[in-house]
């Protein structure tokens, strides 16, 4: 099994991807720094709060974060944000900050991914292999969401 296949399998293992949520809920999100965030969003059908831990791809401004949907447009959190863009973000020492989500255009996505690749070439290489193994598509087709934090 390749490292990419193993990474893709881990990302599809529920306990593995949900483990950071427990740390965020215990107010230990600062352990992840600004690299990982907890996104609280609303289920598009249930209307219930939902939680997912995600890596930040970029932080263009102090009040703007960019996140990637590693499972493409089929990810539930991604579909929920399209239906209900109002959400809350917990990152570092900032707990449940209100935010608004906006999908990036293909040109904006290309720009962000190019910057990420230049800033983190090894991480980009490994993450792109994992994501491409998980979704059977190229990383260029991964949708990105911009989160604008409210003051």
Image (tube, grey):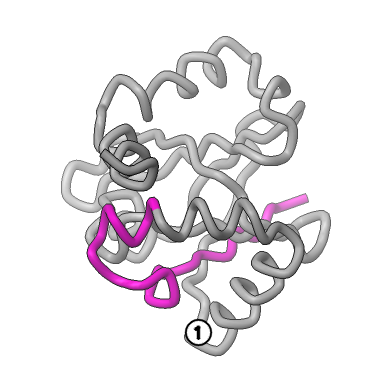
In this rendering, the answer to whether 77 lies above or below 105 is above
Residue 63 located left or right of residue 65: right
In x, y percent, where is residue 99?
60, 52
Residue 112 percent coordinates (x, y) = 64, 73
How far from the left and from the top, in percent, is residue 26? Answer: 57, 10
Q: Classify residue 24 by image quadrant.
A: top right
Looking at the image, which residue is at 41% across and 44% down?
Answer: 41
Could you tell me which residue is drawn at 42 percent across and 69 percent down?
139
Q: Which residues are magenta?
A: 130-151
Q: Which residue is mark 1?
A: 105
In the picture shown, does residue 5 fall above or below 107?
above
Label 1 environment density (alpha carbons within 10 Å; few <14, some 14–19, many ≥20): few
Instruction: Identify which residue, 41 or 143, lies in the foreground.
Output: 143
- Residue name at image x 67 percent, y 61 percent: 121
Membership of 66 in magenta stretch: no
Q: Residue furthest right?
A: 62
Task: State the image coordinates of residue 147 (x, y, percent, origin top left).
Answer: 60, 59
Tally of marks: 1
Vertical relation: 71 (above or below) 114: above
Q: Quadrant of the N terminus?
A: top left
Residue 73 occupies quadrant: bottom left
């Amino acid at each position: 099994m390749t490292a990419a296949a193993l990474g893709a399998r881990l990302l599809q293992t529920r306990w593995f991807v949900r483990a950071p949520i427990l740390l965020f809920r215990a107010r230990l999100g600062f352990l992840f720094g600004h690299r990982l965030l907890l996104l609280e969003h609303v289920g598009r059908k249930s209307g219930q709060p939902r939680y997912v831990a995600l890596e930040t791809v970029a932080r263009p401004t102090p009040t703007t974060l960019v996140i990637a949907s590693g499972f493409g447009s089929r990810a539930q959190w991604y579909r929920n944000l399209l239906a209900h863009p109002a959400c809350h973000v917990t990152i570092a020492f900032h707990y449940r900050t209100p935010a608004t989500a906006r999908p990036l255009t293909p040109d904006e996505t290309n720009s962000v991914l190019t910057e990420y690749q230049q800033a983190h070439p090894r991480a980009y290489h490994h993450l792109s292999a994992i994501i491409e193994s998980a979704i059977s598509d190229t990383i260029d087709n991964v949708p990105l969401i911009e989160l604008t934090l409210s003051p």
